[in-house]
Amino acid sequence: MSTPGRFVLVPTPIGNMGDITLRAIEVLKEANRIACEDTRHSAPLLSKLGITGKPLVSLHDHNEVRRLPELLDAVRGGETVAMVTDAGMPAVSDPGYRVVQACIEQGIPFEVLPGPSAVLTALVGSGFPVHAFRFLGFLPIKKGKRLSVLEESLSIEGTSIFFESPHRLLSTLELLAEKLPDAPCCVARELTKKFETYHRGTAAELLAHFQVHPPKGEIVFLVKGE
């Protein structure tokens, strides 16, 4: 009889390599194979942790459905399969949701390790209310829908959290500054990295700042509701 296998979703640092947990390192070292959103991205982290020669399998949005059966079969055969994404918690705006869904449906053991999260880091660092909050992923591409989502977020209690691209942040701030210039906002940039910054203020104030200082890097955008 084969040894019971398991699928483990392993969070990885969102910037600072020192944020990897001891438990995450232990699982990655014990795993029979590691599924990575991008093997080229994960390889340097694994090398830094002294994890070499481990089979790495590409598992991303475009091949998740096709590759998942192979990995689930490996777990059924007794393997420990660890899954990492490029940064942070797997499944949160990243591959991983289908993995958990399939494990639940097929009765396959899985674990989710706690670890780094850009969402929670930005929320606490923003200084906005933490008693009630919601994460809505990336803002819509179309300006009309984007404005509607932002207006709704400002009308409800708590904090709304979004991912936003640096090249579109100005457009988002322009939308808000035109309609709701006093909307309280926070731009959390390059979290846990060397050039981490938090910019807090009204939509109009942040627009003025980023018009002079074009935004760069990975951005979490937060708005404070009523």
Image: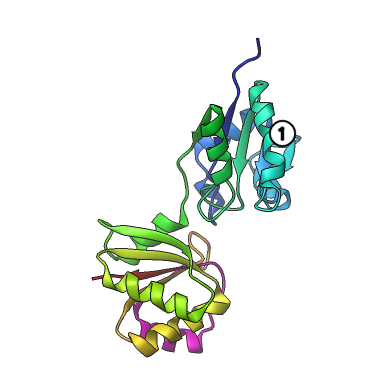
Residue 199 seen in render: no
Q: Determine which quarter of the picture holds residue 29.
A: top right
Is residue 79 shown above or below 52? above
- Image coordinates of residue 43 in percent, x first then y, are 71, 47
Stretch of the chain drawn in magenta: 196-220
Q: Determine which quarter of the picture holds residue 217.
A: bottom right
Q: Is residue 99 left or right of residue 60?
A: left
Residue positioned 55% across, 72% down in the render: 165
Residue placed furthest toward the top? 1
Task: Give the color scheme: rainbow, by chain, secondary structure or one colour.
Answer: rainbow
Is residue 198 shown above or below 36? below
Residue positioned 64% across, 23% down in the render: 76
In the rendered image, the quadrant that contains the N terminus is top right
Choose between 33 and 15: the one closer to the eye: 33
Residue positioned 65% across, 31% down in the render: 72
Q: Is residue 68 left or right of residue 190?
A: right
Residue 207 counted in the magenta span: yes
Q: Determine which quarter of the picture holds residue 123.
A: bottom left
- Image coordinates of residue 9 in percent, x first then y, are 55, 39
Can you identify the residue that label 1 sits on?
A: 70
Residue placed furthest toward the front? 105
Q: Is residue 19 left or right of residue 160?
A: right
In the rendered image, the quadrant that contains the C terminus is bottom left
- Image coordinates of residue 81 in percent, x first then y, are 63, 32
Residue 107 seen in render: yes
Residue positioned 39% across, 83% down in the render: 176
User: Callout 1: helix, strand or loop?
Assistant: helix
Is residue 200 shown above or below 161? below
* Three-letter amino acid code of the residue under disc 1: Glu
- Image coordinates of residue 138 in percent, x first then y, are 50, 66
Q: Is residue 65 left or right of residue 222?
A: right
Q: Residues within 10 Å of mark 1 (few under 14, many from 20)?
A: few
